Image (cartoon, coloured by chain):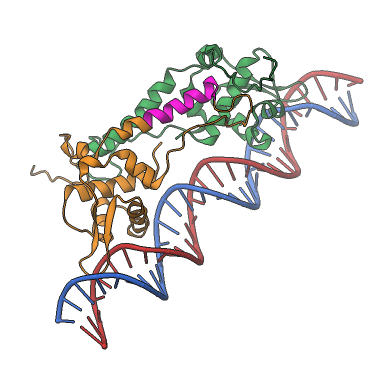
Chain colours: A orange, B green, C blue, D red
DNA sequence: AACAAATCGGACCTCTGTGTCCAGAATATT
DNA sequence: AATATTCTGGACACAGAGGTCCGATTTGTT
């Protein structure tokens, strides 16, 4: 359902959110999130263009979030890398249907709508706050 | 969200449901549903393997549903052509996470789960019954 | 038996998502 | 000023989805 690229983008954003106010290089993020470094570089550029992260070149540079984790939603990240394609008009091109979707396409679009709405309501801060057995991106040793 | 192939498959199934107890050739279905004929042939084979349609070769042959529209769900069709990939274990391969998804992946899997559950609850009969302004696959002239 | 109508199966093509790589531009340190 | 570090932008490679095509096989009609 969700593309690989979107998942990578979310991992990176979550990682940055876990270590606020510090810049991280592509390589650092890639290592921590286990995303192919060269590909993550491309994803980070997309996140930059969407203004979700600031980038700083040169020595000591890297990426950091442009706003607080509580102000970044899943949908923001999704839209940055893979625009959510809703069904706006009849895919068959039937003139008489036009914008009035038939039951079939209405149902399909409803599914997309649910995802969109759900993701719009979930922030990165929610992910950090949620107490689960596993901590995002972190490998816990038996010591815990 | 939903693949092109799945949409094609649904169109074909809905079309057959609208004309029960008659066999239709790939070409007939393709024309009515506006799906590329050669590709629909491949999709129909998949639907046949999933036992959603019966196929009859030779003169007068074609496809028809194996069961009543009320007994075929969206999920049946989805699974026939594009198995729904849920997140079963940590995509990073973190040992400590394993089957206990972290908040991030839990959310992503939840989205997939919602689609899966929703589609499991919608039958082809529902699509036919639903009175909307537009009738699935049918171009209505101004006469209506 | 011969023929025509259909599906079946697989080979092949194209395009997009995923992924790699490298030269160039910006920036901090020395 | 020289150098090392890091992002930027684009070219290239690979795999899978979407799509085409054709010979082989089954089946009904004549």
Q: Is residue A47 left or right of residue C23?
A: left
Residue A21 drawn above or below residue B65: below
> Is residue A110 within the magenta segment?
yes
Q: Quadrant of residue A121?
A: top left
Q: Residue furthest front?
A: B142
Residue at the spot x=54%, y=16% of the render? B132
- Image coordinates of residue A111 in percent, x first then y, are 42, 27
Q: Is residue B118 left or right of residue A71?
A: right
Q: Nearer the viewer, residue A16 or B56?
A: A16
Residue at the spot x=33%, y=54% of the render? A48
- Image coordinates of residue A103 in percent, x first then y, are 52, 20
Part of the protein shown in magenta: A100-115
Q: Is residue B121 visible?
A: yes
Residue A72 drawn above or below residue C27: above
Residue B85 drawn above or below residue A10: above
Which quarter of the figure is the N terminus of chain B placed in? top left
Which quarter of the figure is the C terminus of chain B placed in? top right
Q: Is residue A64 left or right of residue A89?
A: left
Q: Is residue B30 left or right of residue A115?
A: right
Residue at the spot x=20%, y=45% of the render? A68
- Image coordinates of residue B135 in percent, x first then y, are 60, 18
> Is residue A96 within the magenta segment?
no
Q: Nearer the viewer, residue A52 or B143?
A: B143
Count the marks.
0
Q: Main secondary structure of the magenta part?
A: helix
Q: Is residue A36 visible?
A: no
Residue D5 drawn above or below residue A46: below
């Amino acid at each position: 359902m969700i593309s690989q690229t979107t998942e990578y983008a979310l991992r990176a954003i979550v990682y940055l959110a876990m270590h606020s106010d510090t810049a991280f290089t592509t390589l650092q993020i890639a290592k921590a999130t286990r995303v192919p470094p060269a590909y993550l570089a491309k994803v980070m550029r997309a996140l930059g263009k969407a203004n979700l992260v600031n980038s700083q070149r040169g020595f000591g540079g890297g990426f950091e979030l442009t706003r607080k984790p509580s102000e970044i939603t899943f949908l923001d990240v999704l839209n940055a890398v893979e625009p959510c394609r809703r069904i706006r008009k009849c895919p068959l091109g039937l003139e008489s249907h036009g914008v009035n979707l038939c039951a079939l396409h209405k149902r399909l679009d409803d599914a997309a709508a649910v995802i969109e709405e759900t993701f719009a309501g979930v922030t990165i801060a929610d992910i950090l706050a949620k107490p689960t057995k596993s901590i995002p991106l972190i490998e816990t040793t038996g010591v815990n």
